[in-house]
Image (cartoon, rainbow, N blue to C red):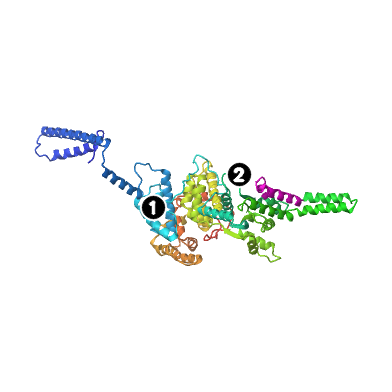
Amino acid sequence: MEVVDKENTSNWTYFVKRFRKTKTQTNPKLESDEDQKQEENRIDETEKSFLEEQQIIDETEKSFLEEPQIIDENEQNFLDEQDKKFQKLGFTSTDKPIDEDEQKHKIERCISIIKKLHQKEIGSFSRLESISNYLTDGNQLLYEDEQYLREEYKKLKEASGLDEDFDYKKSYVPNKDASEPQTILIDDVEENPTDDFTSLSITIANIIKDSTPHFTIGIYGEWGTGKTTLMKAIEKNLTTDGVLKTEQRILPVWFNAWQYDREEHLATISLMKTVAYEMSGHEKFDAISKTILKGLTILGKDVTQNLIQEIVSKGGFENEDALEEKINQLNELHRESIYFDGLKKIKQQMEQIRKSGGKDFRVVIFIDDLDRCSPDKALEILESIKLFLGMEGFIFVVGLSYKTVTELITKAYTATGVKGEDYIKKIIQIPIKIPTWSQESILDLIENKIKKNLHEEYTDFLSQNSDMIARVVDYNPRQLKRFVNNVIIAFETFAGKANSQEIKFNEIFLVKILKTEWPDFYAEIVRNKDFLEILKWILTKPRELKRYFKYLNTYTEEGPEQQKQQRFLLLSKLAERTQGRIDSRHVEILSDFNYESWIFFAHVRDVLFGIKDWKVINTIINVVEEFSYDLPVGASQSKIPQPSE
């Protein structure tokens, strides 16, 4: 029953008037106007009584709701049980306000799951995309959609061996405050960038702590993949919190090889000095520090040259005994240098420390950026490690590009025929490869590390298109930061111009992806606006392309070239059916796209077709265009010249 409010009786008045009009028109007994008027007055009184009565009912209901109601124990238990069931199904209690951060995390988590389902081709593509679009618009997840995602996620866990639950979440990381200016991303070392790095760093640290300290670990990885990050994480796991550096039982020493690349003297001297300076003042290792520095001083040019100069300048000695004394003094100095008795003394001192203080005393020397050194300097550093190979108490952790270092060693020893691979094996006993970066780890890096330094609109686009962006940057975290910085510079520069056209940040993001991943496709779009209409038509999945999309969505063991050839053949028929509107060159460009490519285009279609002036945005993106570098596997090299401004 509808409750009538005293101040809002219009609906009821309208209804009663209609009723009254009908009654007066159909009452044959009212023959005169006077009779008609009396009847209307009677109905008015009836209507008034009805409204007054309704108001009384309304007040009674209000009083009932305001008074505390007595619920017996059985009713209370029943309500509690129902509430638990609703909460178990994912409903939020109505007496608690919805946490916006919690809601946002849930949306991000569901979108991430949908992408993983797409990758494994689990679930209905159209329904998953519908849910994704609904959530992207900022809507809350519907109960039936959540149940569907939970069921599909179970299949995903079985297929992929995932350990995470559906509701898995990490601590929420906020975006950079929108009131602060957007700055570029600095290439600093990220602390624990992914779970894989964290787990591996703990494992390696435990090996260093528990094993006899007499080995070298090699951290292999290419440029920008996180060698320094992993090594810093290992170092952090070796030290004891709350203990002074001079009292640590494991002493980490950090040697950045590249910083000493221009030193005139041998790299051995720079390395040994670094070790000695870190040992200085330590309760156990200070004595070794003094031995090293003394041995290095003797090696220095000044001491030896000054002594020889003194002998020569005399022009002769009164007797041979005096000359012999000076020569013996010179020999004694050389004997105490780091290359002779100095090393023996260091070994004895370390043995004494571990015997009296405990077997857990050790020095761990981290050597970073070895592959950035000149070939000669890199070889000098590797030769320096060999000085300690027979000395217990020292462990080396070396970060290097395996390919780069082995090639330079092979080249340096061409005359002797020594191979770089064999040389490295003799020095490095434990090779560790940097964990491979995946789409999930790139997304994890965006959400938990990069996000805090970016405005919300930047991270939203990165997160929503992490799969394609990961491909574009070749799953390289450093290249990801360069990519984002290019977009920031292009957008902020153009947005700051007076009377500039309205260009959105996500348009620049998209164009940067297109130009990097599909240069031919991008060039054709800038050149020929009709090409976008072709793309728009294909995205509707017309009947003419049924076989083409079926092939894309079917697993095949064919190689990349065979798949591209098959896609080309299936698309070739378009040239005939479009009366030349789609020619063979267009078909060649479109044949680069696989199933994931079309998912990406479907996801960004609003941005793609919303760009108003491709010539202008091409000018903007050219400002931050990098020099050419190898594109990731699957991306095509440009066959046509890039469009001019």
What amino acid is at disc 1?
Ile
Do tag 1 and tag 2 residues touch (Cβ < 8 Å)?
no
Q: Of residues 436 and 53, which is closer to you in this image? A: 436
Residue range (magenta): 274-300
How crowded pointer 2 is (Cα within 10 Å; few <14, some 14-19, many 20+) is rated as few
Q: Secondary structure at mark 2?
A: loop
Tell me the kind of residue under disc 2.
Leu
User: Residue 435, how many percent across, how many down?
Assistant: 54, 57
Label 2: which residue? 244
> Eyeballing the image, is 562 above or below 352?
below
232 versus 59 height, above or below: below
Residue located 26% across and 42% down the image: 72
Q: Quadrant of the N terminus?
A: top left
User: Residue 88's spot in the image, x, y percent?
Assistant: 35, 50
Q: Nearer the viewer, residue 307 or 21?
A: 307
Closest to the observer: 93 or 597?
93
Query: What is the distance, in whole Å, between disc 1 and disc 2 at their CAs?
Result: 54 Å
The residue positioned 42% from the left and 45% from the top of the image is 102
